Amino acid sequence: MTRFLLAIAALVGCSATYRADAQPPVLSPLCREFQQLLGMSRDKGISRKALEDSLTRGAKEDADDHYFNLDIDGDDINDIVTRSCSHSTMPSDPCMLTINLSSGGKIDFEEWKFFLVRHRGKIYAVSAELGPNRKRGNGKIFTVGPRNVQEVCSGL
């Protein structure tokens, strides 16, 4: 009888564990916001928040995107932000984000195909497909600065 009760307890414990593992992970409010924005059409969703790269006067177009008027380290002095990506449809290397901080530090970040957005006053790197028909589950969101680039959402 004791073995029977132990077996039932073990089965109940396993099924409870299975049910807990089968539920989707709980997303933070920020990640839920990004998930909604990623699923919207390009003219309404996160694309509207994408940062525009710029060329300095007289500079030639190159493979690097340069972003001006960004203060990543919070010292009210603009930092030098550069993103470089292969324009190939089958890139051999990930994209690279390099930030030279006005305070003297440097941040380097690598990820496959990402773009920068400003959301609620903060800068984020978004690595995800866009639109209502996008492939879900591989999207990642990273917060940029002031000391590093850190993943805040995954599996979007």
Image (tube, rainbow, N blue to C red):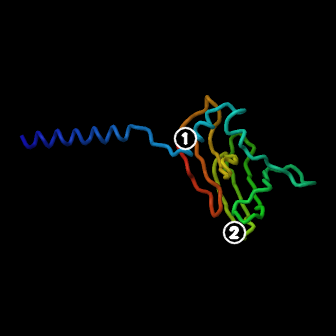
Which residue was labeled with disc 1? 32
State whether residue 100 is above or below residue 94.
below
Q: Where the C terminus falls, by quadrant?
A: top right
Tell me if mark 1 has few (under 14), some (14-19) or many (20+) residues whose alpha carbon lies within 10 angstroms of its own.
some
Q: Is residue 1 left or right of residue 70?
A: left
Tell me the kind of residue under disc 1. Answer: Arg
State whether residue 71 is above or below residue 137.
below
Q: Where the N terminus falls, by quadrant?
A: top left
Question: What label sits on residue 6 in the rendered view?
Answer: none
Identity of the residue drawn at 12% across and 41% down = 5
Which residue was labeled with disc 2? 105
Q: Residue at the bottom extreme? A: 104
Identity of the residue drawn at 31% across and 42% down = 17
Query: Which of 114/31 is in front?
Result: 31
Tell me the kind of residue under disc 2. Answer: Gly
Identity of the residue drawn at 65% across and 35% down = 130
Q: Earlier in the sequence, mark 2 or mark 1?
A: 1
